[in-house]
Amino acid sequence: MLRTIAAFERIGEENAFAVLARANALAAQGRDIINLGIGQPDFRTPDHIVEAAVKALRDGHHGYTPTQGIPPLREAIAADLHRRFGVTVSPAEVMVLPGGKPVMFMAILMFGEPGADILYPDPGFPIYRSMIEYTGARPIPVPVREVNGFAFSAEETLKLITPQTRLLIVNSPANPTGGVTPKAEVDKLVAGLARHPDVCVMSDEIYDQLVYDGERHVCLLSYPEIRDRLILLNGWSKTYAMTGWRLGYAVWPGKLYDYARKLAVNLHSCVNASAQYAGLAALTGPQDAVTAMAAEFDRRRQVVVEGLNRLAGVSCATPKGAFYAFPNIKRTGWQAKPLANALLDDAGVAVIGGPDFGILGEGYLRLSYANSTENIVKALDRMGAFLASRKAA
């Protein structure tokens, strides 16, 4: 009998990938499936980025790179953050990683242990809670409420901090809700954190260039008073349609940088060279594709919200960022997970049930509008027909 550690019994997963697998299996059987479940842009990676990776391979960049990332890329990240937010970041604070999840993994490992509390958004990205539970720390959900436009409440967040709190995770623009927390609320949070100098903050800003309706992203690096305990997570997947390249980065404060470097050495050694040169081209090359993709997501957002609000028993707040809608389905009489399953099996529409993102996700679905307008309209028609013909299970 193999004896593994008990922590593996606590580890969760990201159900979007399970739904993707089910959708693909049904499609392989000849079913017409529209996938609004996975958070993946349907655009190709811009050509100049792809060509940079090809050139890197042809130029012989086939070996190990520095664990922290190639120096030109780390310099470009620091320059990009300065250009967009006016913040000064040293390349020596920047680490290139194989996606954004390793940042979550490392940060939670650094602070999570039995007896410690880690605060995370609920509804929120499921890997936060999964990794907290793996470490044995106590997961403390920070409510993200529809009444607040799915922005976090600084007051509510600060009230949850105790002497046991080690780490606070924040995410804006947010997955799964599309909520964007306004600057005034972030200001209140940072001011309140002055009373809790031992609490580290991990800010997941992977959707920072996908904001709408005149909203502006608030980068937590802009607050010098928390820079010595702030971990910034960002990357290329969503902004540049590079999900499969597995390329992300973090800005680490103080000794946490060397802890992260050692974890990287033990885990993955380094990020593959060609992807790093692609990331360099993305940051230093033309940004037209970023602007065009964001504009197209905005158009789709309006189609999704309008369509969802026409469905019987459904209401949908307008998301201000990312590429997700989080409609309220409580008046349909359905529980969220059974409805999501039935929509896939019987209507050919893949969506994610809100409880996959936390306790407060019950009564909601997550739809990704990172799909074509044509497919979105077809999916909404199918959902409407299903809800009109089927009573809650």
Image (cartoon, rainbow, N blue to C red):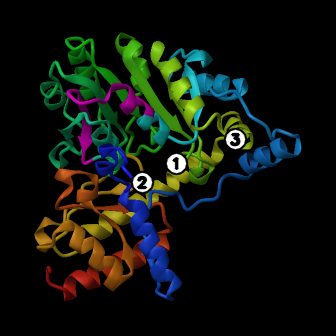
Q: Earlier in the sequence, mark 1 or mark 3?
A: 1
Percent coordinates x, y for residue 110 in the rendering: 38, 26
Q: Residue at x 78, y 44 (%)?
A: 52
Q: Is residue 133 left or right of residue 102?
A: left
Disc number for residue 272: 3
**What is the crowding at mark 3: few (fewer than 14 residues within 10 Å), some, or many (at least 20)?**
many
| Residue pointed to by mark 2 | 323
**Element at label 1:** loop
Q: Secondary structure at mark 3?
A: loop
Select label 2 or label 1 by which is in front.
Answer: 1
Quarter of the picture holding the C terminus: bottom left
Separation of marks 2 and 3 at Cα, in angstroms? 28 Å
Task: Please provide the residue range marked out in magenta.
Answer: 106-123
Q: Nearer the viewer, residue 123 or 295?
A: 123
Q: Say if mark 2 contacts mark 3, CB within 8 Å.
A: no
Question: Is 25 drawn above or below residue 246 in the view shown?
Answer: below
Which residue position is annotated with label 1? Answer: 238
In the rendered image, the residue lying farthest to the front is: 1
Q: Nearer the viewer, mark 2 or mark 3?
A: 3
Where residue 103 sits in the image (x, y, percent)?
Answer: 46, 34
Q: Is residue 346 left or right of residue 122?
A: right
Judging depth in this view, the residue of 73 and 145 nearest the camera is 73
In the displayed structure, 335 sits above or below 27; it is above
